[in-house]
Amino acid sequence: MWQYEKKLQYPVKIKTPDAKAAKVIISQLGGPDGELSASLRYLNQRYTMPYGEIVGTLTDIGTEELAHVEMISAILYQLTRNLTPEDIKRAGFDTYFVDHTSGIYPIAASGVPFRAEYFQVKGDTYADLHEDLAAEQKARVTYDNILRLVDDPDVKDPIRFLRERELVHFQRFGEALRIAQEKDNYKNFYAFNRQFDKGAGRCSSNVERFGQNRNMKH
């Protein structure tokens, strides 16, 4: 399915280790709005999407998020390599170090390890796409916060690139939402799971009424 090109999507070349910066940037690996949860969200949501164009969007973006996991991991590695015990203690990196040394482990800046609750797969076109739109904006805010806290230009450069990709993904999910609305061609997009309820023959009378009356005004 994938062809792996053995280079980062965007170069990471950090000359000065900084465990203090790593402590906040690590949230974009294993935090609630990080790249790992994004990749799992999109690559799992795509199976129940009814339209090929949206499946393609989720596959493309989910794959790119894996590349962003790789970039964040490279940033963390370069920020924490060759640290002395004094560096670790001075940066407050000791609580992470005692459990993981300088290995790359998915955890939030708050210290909470990665958990599956960070992402949702609902099996409903509109619920999932709105989840995705919100996720991209929350990730953008996290990158904004990181940029406020780090000073090294070598660190800020790839972080800015990752932030810009969140904006692009948000736009693409907006396009996916419009595609679904146009293809479904009915007005109450958010009232029920049209594909599942119709196919399973489990529509309530209220749902059936909504589905039959496509010209209903709201």
Image (cartoon, grey):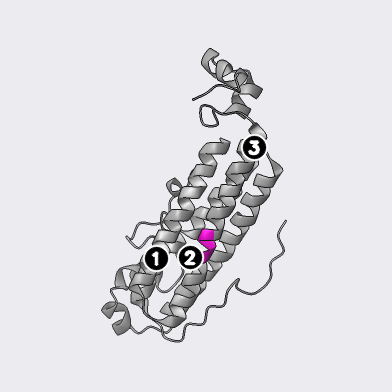
- Residue at the image point whose x is 38% and y is 68% from the top: 146
Dot placed on the residue nearer the N-terminal end, 3 or 2: 2
Q: Amino acid at mark 3?
A: Glu
- Residue at the image point whose x is 42% and y is 65% from the top: 143
Q: Are marks 2 and 1 in contact (CB under 8 Å)?
A: yes
Q: Which residues are magenta?
A: 163-167
Q: Position of residue 157 (x, y in %)?
A: 48, 77
**Badge 2: residue crowd in 10 Å (few <14, some 14–19, many ≥20):** some
Q: Position of residue 60 (x, y in %)?
A: 65, 56
Quadrant location, the N terminus: bottom right
Identify the disc placed on residue 144: 1
Q: Are marks 3 and 2 in contact (CB under 8 Å)?
A: no
- In the figure, is residue 148 to the left or right of 154? left
Q: Nearer the viewer, residue 112 or 132?
A: 132
Whether residue 23 is visible to the viewer of this picture, yes or no, is: no
Dot placed on the residue nearer the N-terminal end, 3 or 1: 1
Whether residue 83 is visible to the viewer of this picture, yes or no, is: yes
Q: Which residue is mark 2?
A: 163
Where is 122 relative to 174, above or below?
Answer: above
Q: Nearer the viewer, mark 3 or mark 2?
A: 3
Report if residue 166 lies within the magenta region: yes
Dot placed on the residue nearer the N-terminal end, 2 or 1: 1
Q: Which residue is mark 3?
A: 182
Q: Amino acid at mark 2?
A: Arg
Q: Main secondary structure of the magenta part?
A: helix
Circle 2 sits in a helix, a strand or a loop, which is it?
Answer: helix
Q: Nearer the viewer, mark 3 or mark 1?
A: 3
Q: CA distance from mark 2 to mark 1?
A: 8 Å
